Image (cartoon, rainbow, N blue to C red):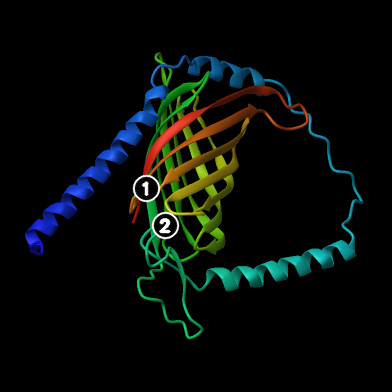
Amino acid sequence: MAASIPDYARGSNARYHRGMRRVAAFFLLCLHPLVFLPADIADVAKKVEQAEAVPDERHPIEAGAAADDGDNSFAEFVFDVFALLWLWNNLGTTYGPYPHAPEGYVLWQDAEGHIPPGGRDQRYSADAQAFELEGFGRGAWARLEGRFFRFIGPYAEVWTLDDGHALQHSARLGGQVSLFNADGFNWFLYGQYVHWFGVIDRDGGSFGSVMRSYPVKPLSLEWRAGAQTFDGFVIGESEVSIGALFGRFEPYVGYRWWNLGTGGDASVDIGAYSGAFAGLRAHF
């Protein structure tokens, strides 16, 4: 005898909860190795202050170094080609509900401007992660990013770091603009205002790029590269991660590298810090 609607609903609900339990178990397993790791925020702050005290002797640019007209013409041609390709790729972009969705994730409107079924002008994701930077601290990181219109939108982050003795915090508020969109690949640039507070108090900026790939279901890959810049020092940053999509939810693990220095001609290397992270992202 065929199953009744209530029986089917109970079965679907049980499968959903089993899936969510697997996601939660995976997330907790990834967090396990991040719990007890030695670190020292005060030591990093001391290194930053010492490096900032070194004078930066910048050399003036020599007069008369004008760009070649031929080089300028070629650069303008390349820019024009890139601009046309960017317009073609981004202005017609709409989004499905999440990566690897049955209807697709990146959907293009037709020549008459009609949005395909399920396509939207917006997409967003929010995630939270536990992370550590060996020699600096361990803590929590949260991020909200997306597109409020096709190719442009917010990119905001907050994190807090604990070394067992002191806390360090940061808030990064800014936006992103798409460079290239495809159903299995997305590349965008971001820029942010950055505020550090706690043991180290600084204001600065952040910029970089993020590449995301969805090669086969349910796999997701991400690479982020950029820099945080302050008056006295610079942080070069890079991170890679791998995850899996369970509907709208995406547990992931990855590794982050930070390289601190003062920059300039009298550059001083403050230190390199790296460590693992694990998180959970929701697409909406």
The single residue placed furthest to the right in the displayed view is 64
Q: Tell me where residue 99 appears, x and y as whole percent.
A: 42, 57
Q: Secondary structure at mark 2?
A: loop
Q: Tell me where residue 192 appears, x and y as whole percent.
A: 52, 46
Q: Tell me where residue 232 appears, x and y as whole percent.
A: 63, 29
Residue at screen point 60% across, 22% down: 48
Question: Which quarter shows the C terminus?
Answer: bottom left
Residue in front for this viewpoint, 149 or 60:
149
Residue at screen point 51% across, 54% down: 215
Mark 1 closeness class: few <14, some 14–19, many ≥20 residues within 10 Å: some
Q: Please report whichever mark, 2 or 1, sits nearer to the chain's N-terminal start.
A: 2
Horizontal side of residue 187 vs 166, given as left or right: right
Mark 2 closeness class: few <14, some 14–19, many ≥20 residues within 10 Å: many
Q: Which residue is mark 1?
A: 126
Residue 232, can we see it? no
Q: Which residue is mark 2?
A: 99
Q: CA distance from mark 2 to mark 1?
A: 14 Å
Q: What kind of residue is marked 2?
A: Pro
Q: Compared with residue 281, is residue 29 higher up or lower down, i.e. above or below? A: above
Determine which quarter of the picture holds residue 26: top left
Q: What kind of residue is marked 1?
A: Ala
The single residue placed furthest to the front in the displayed view is 1
Residue 60, can we see it? yes
